[in-house]
Amino acid sequence: MKRRSILGIAAACLGPVGQVTMAQTLPSRPLKVLVAWPAGGLIDVVTRAMTDKLGTMWPQSVMVENKPGAYGLIGTEQVMQSAPDGHTWLIATMGTPMSASLYKRKWIAADEFAGVAILGRSALLAVVPASLPANTLGEFIALARSQPGKFNYLNPSLGSATHLNTELIKLSQRISMTSVMYNGQPPGVIDLVSGQLHFAMIAPQVAGPHIKSGKLRALAVAFPSRLKDYPDVPTMAEAGYADASVVAAYSVLVPKRTPRDVIARFNADINTALADAEVKRRIEAAGAIAAGPSTPEQVDAFMRSETQRWDRFFREVPIDLT
């Protein structure tokens, strides 16, 4: 039996009035936000932009803890096992809802966590070396189809948006490319610029300097709209590949049994923090876009739909993590 928190027992005893009062005074002690990835990365920067603002709104401190390892599973499972009182948050990535199908876990994230709010989304640019004779994504796909197995692509992490965007292109267009693993995007860009790699879906802030220098060519962007810094680069949908587009989203989750009034209170505060101009600036500078107001129900629906989407995908595209 899972241990009930003192806060949860007290809320049950106090009834609706007591729960409302308790929600209004949250957090009642320092709150921990767990990022299951290394410090300094995009997810970490987006998280800290939000938590720094929350720290000015609350009398209690907000602590960000980085807990990388095992594709984010170590940190995820730590939050899953924490008390459902709202004082431990998980920053979910697109890998969170695919844990059961990709990482062969016995649990399903949508069943173990409750959504609180959406933090933001980040875009990826489809790029090729300037030496490659392809000026559009369609031209690159035609080139790869005409030479099966010749081309390779940058893969900074299994299950990442970079990885899965490319795999969706391969699957939907029936082309063959080889995944080449790197420890993050920047090391792989060196080989991409030199022509040893032929394709990548990477963050604009990583690709930007090389696009401006003319060493890389941007073909499309995986995002709902064009990017202001690349107004001539079409979206994946505009290029005709909407079904092959993955937009990385970041959300706040808490253990499933967290009281709904507690979730609602934190949802309101996160939405307020994300509306702050300085928070938006910091998130945009990191290469992402802060989300507009969201509801816990939207996060829950997203987690369920993504779980189903990736379960279907990995049945067609088995990936060996060993």
Image (cartoon, helix red, strand yellow):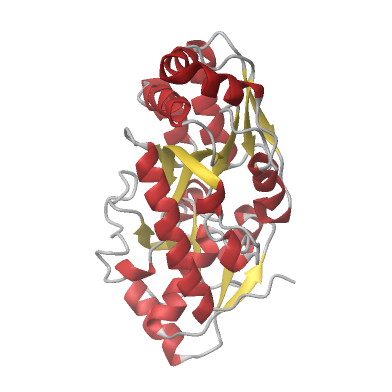
Q: Is residue 252 above or below residue 51?
A: below
Q: Is residue 277 shown above or below 312?
A: above
Tell me which corner region of the image, top left, top right, bottom left or bottom right, holds residue 214. bottom left
Q: Nearer the viewer, residue 290 or 115?
A: 115
- The spot of residue 196 in percent (x, y) is 62, 73
Give the answer, above or below, for where 253 lies relative to 111. above
> Is residue 173 something one can see in this rendering?
yes
Residue at image coords 44%, 59%? 306
Q: Position of residue 168 (x, y in %)?
A: 44, 72
User: Relative to 136, is 18 on the left or the right?
Assistant: right
**Quadrant containing the N terminus in the rendered view:** top right
Depicted 173 relative to depicted 273: above or below: below
> Residue 73, position in %: x, y?
68, 52
Residue pictured at 45% horizontal, 12% vertical: 21
Q: Residue furthest top?
A: 59
- Residue 194 in sight from this viewpoint: no
Q: Position of residue 69 (x, y in %)?
A: 73, 50
Q: Which of the two residues, 251 or 290, is positioned nearer the viewer here?
A: 251
Q: Looking at this view, is 230 or 245 the one in front?
A: 245
Identified at 56% across, 57% down, the residue is 108
Determine the residue located farthest toward the left in the rendered image: 238
Q: Residue 284's image quarter?
A: top left
Q: Residue at x 65, y 62 (%)?
A: 106
Q: Nearer the viewer, residue 272 or 223?
A: 272
